[in-house]
Image (tube, rainbow, N blue to C red):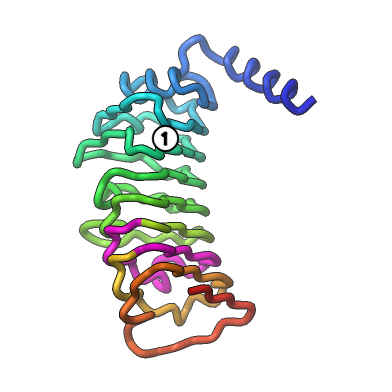
Amino acid sequence: MHDLLEQMGKDIVNEECKQPGGRSRLWNYEDIDHVLTTETGTENVEAISCRLFRRGILKLSATAFMKMCNLRFIQLYDMSNEVLLPKNFEFCAQALRCLYWECYPLESLPLKFWPKNLVELHMPSSKLIQLWNGGDKPLGSLKLMDLSHSWYLIRIPDLSSIAPNLEFLYLNGCESLVEIPSLQNLSNLVELRMRGSKLIQLWNGGDKVLFINFRYIL
């Protein structure tokens, strides 16, 4: 029954528009490849979800996402670094709520990338060195940040300032991260995972804070 309902839902979405870029949801690799490489995505697109493993190289232009101003959900599984992005990659993300991008290939997020409504940021096994190069952005709605196994990550922003509502922070396997800023004002933080990280200093400034219901896992 579940499979039947899922297929019915997909059929309804496919009937929204003959062109994939005019549909509200994209999950088929061929459709996603067409939309992102031809820049035919429109404001109708609200969600993209696809496993890219062994599906070929997906080479995107700098403005592949720019017309999709209502995009709220992105889920890209990329186990073999099969997405190529230019260094001047741009990203319109004002409406984005959840970003899951495995093996993100750039050293930082686009400078103009400011997902002020983002609730969950999942970027495991990324090539990030830092989130932004040239100033951090406020993420007041963010509840979860997962940068696990981002081996090149050397710094994270002061989350107490930019993400005061953060509840879950995962930094497992971030081998190049040597310190994290103060967590003093993260009163909602309930779980911090850093297994396999080689932190020299847990947080700078020397202020150690205990949180109610806080779970710290090395």
Q: Residue at x 50, y 46 (%)?
A: 98
- Magenta span: chief secondary structure: loop
Is 84 situated above or below 98? above
Is 172 situated above or below 4? below
Judge whether residue 91 is colored magenta.
no
Quadrant for residue 191, please give it. bottom right
Tell which residue pokes out farthest to the top in this image. 18
**Residue for badge 1:** 69
Judge whether residue 164 is colored magenta.
yes
Residue 3 as seen in the image, left or right of residue 33: right
Tell which residue pokes out farthest to the right in this image. 1
The magenta-colored residue range is: 150-174
Q: Quadrant of the N terminus?
A: top right
Residue 125 as seen in the image, left or right of residue 190: left
Q: Position of residue 167 (x, y in %)?
A: 55, 67
Q: Position of residue 8 (x, y in %)?
A: 70, 18
Q: Residue at x 65, y 17 (%)?
A: 12
Q: Position of residue 138 (x, y in %)?
A: 39, 61
Q: Residue at x 30, y 62 (%)?
A: 136
What amino acid type should be assigned to the residue bearing mark 1?
Cys
Number of numbered labels in the structure image = 1
Disc 1, SS: loop
Q: Residue at x 40, y 25 (%)?
A: 55
User: In this orientation, which residue lies closer to the viewer: 99 or 172?
Assistant: 172
User: In this orientation, which residue lies closer to the viewer: 113 or 57?
Assistant: 57
